[in-house]
Amino acid sequence: MNSQNRTRVREVMSTPLETIAPDASVPEAAEKMHDREINALVVRTSPRSIVSSSDIIAAVAQGEDITQLAVSDVMTTDVETVTPDLYMEEVAAMMTTYGIKHLPVVDDDYVGMVSSTDVTAHLS
């Protein structure tokens, strides 16, 4: 397959990027994900962070009272990112290697999100 027929991240990434503050409550994050029908939000912190439905489910499974937790209590920090010009095959390899389902897209700043659902849809 030549590079002219390959799909790049910029062609499939979700925009606009959905974000949430680290001090927002976990229920607020869950509500935002539900309302927008997505499974992850970028948390604008340094190092780069993300909160996903899996993070929230893990907190519930551990017996945490999520009504008392902030996003910063459950988020994943120092997340992997991709650039808009990366090929989707490379994204699929990263997701497999790191066992992740969401990758923020960064081009100096955040510009979007690519998910395992995007990868599946465009590589099948």
Image (spheres, helix red, strand yellow):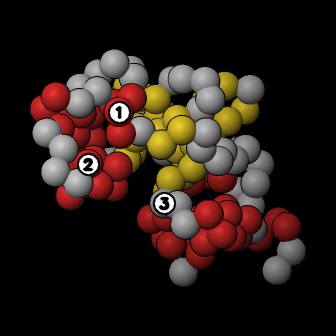
Q: Is residue 28 above or below residue 6?
A: above
Point out which mark residue 59 bears. 2
For badge 3, the amino acid type reads: Lys
For the question of whether residue 124 can be seen, the reply is yes
| Disc 3 secondary structure class | loop
For badge 1, the amino acid type reads: Asp
- State yes or no: discs 1 and 3 in contact (Cβ < 8 Å): no
Q: Nearer the viewer, residue 63 or 2?
A: 63
Which residue in the protein does label 1 denote?
Answer: 73
| Disc 1 secondary structure class | helix
Q: At 27% from the left edge and 41% from the top edge, which residue is drawn?
A: 33
Q: Nearer the viewer, residue 93 or 3?
A: 93
- Closer to the chain start, of discs 1 and 3, is 1
Left or right for 116, reference 92: left
Mark 2 vs mark 3, CA separation in Å? 18 Å
Q: At 70% from the left edge and 56% from the top edge, which residue is drawn?
A: 8
Q: Is residue 32 above or below residue 90?
A: above
- Determine the residue located farthest toward the front in the rendered image: 63
- State yes or no: discs 2 and 1 in contact (Cβ < 8 Å): yes
Q: Residue 48 location in percent, x, y?
A: 59, 32
Q: Residue 17 location in percent, x, y?
A: 48, 33
For label 2, count other residues whose C-alpha is less than 10 Å away and answer few (under 14), some (14-19) or many (20+).
some
Which residue in the protein does label 3 denote?
Answer: 101
What is the quadrant of the C terminus in the image?
bottom right
Q: Nearer the viewer, residue 88 or 66?
A: 66
Q: Quadrant of residue 58?
A: bottom left
